[in-house]
Image (cartoon, grey):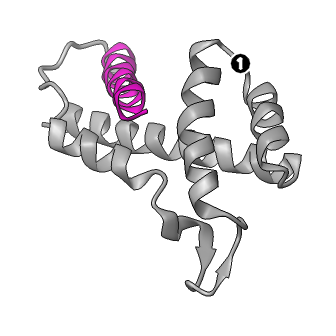
Amino acid sequence: MQEYFSNVYEEQYYRTIFDVQQNIGLATTFTKPDTNLIQKAVAKNYILGNYSIDGKYTVWKNIEYLQTTLEQKIPQGLNLGYNPRKLADIVDKQLKTGYNATVRLIRTEYNALQNEATFEGYKACRN
């Protein structure tokens, strides 16, 4: 899981730099993404506290089961090319939490990682 999300991060980082270079019409120098930043971004996902409100009310009934399921199903689904809805359907059948809640969860995790990589890519272009 960590390796997969690290690859997603790096791909988004380089895609952002490429897009910026195309838009300004100049090639800029940049460095490879810092491995510490990648590990930090990837570790942010699936922090168990992310799925509770004020530490009191747990959004998901069994947090450990949620984490295990996500760590298995998200990389599998993305590697197989499943769109978010199909992936959410698979995860929902296992978690039984409600399809719409599962779609939001999957999109949130994936987008959070991509947003962080995009931000770092913009910072690299600014230097």
The residue at 87%/52% (across/down) is 98
Q: Which of the 4 quarters of the picture holds residue 75?
A: top right
Q: Quadrant of the N terminus?
A: top left
Q: Position of residue 2 (x, y in %)?
A: 37, 35
Residue 67 relative to residue 7: left or right: right
Residue range corresponding to the magenta coloring: 1-23
In front here: 75 or 118? Answer: 75
**Residue 100 point in image, percent of width and height:** 85, 49
- Picture quarter with the C terminus: top left
Q: Secondary structure at mark 1?
A: loop
Front residue of this view, candidates 119 and 50:
50
From the top left corner, tell me how far across and down residue 50 is, in percent: 53, 66
Task: Residue under label 1, please give it.
Answer: 82
Q: Nearer the viewer, residue 93 or 116?
A: 93
Residue type highlighted by circle 1: Tyr
Mark 1 surroundings: few (<14), some (14-19) or many (≥20) residues within 10 A: some
Judged left or right of residue 101, residue 26 is left
Question: Residue 40 appears at what percent x and percent y?
Answer: 27, 50
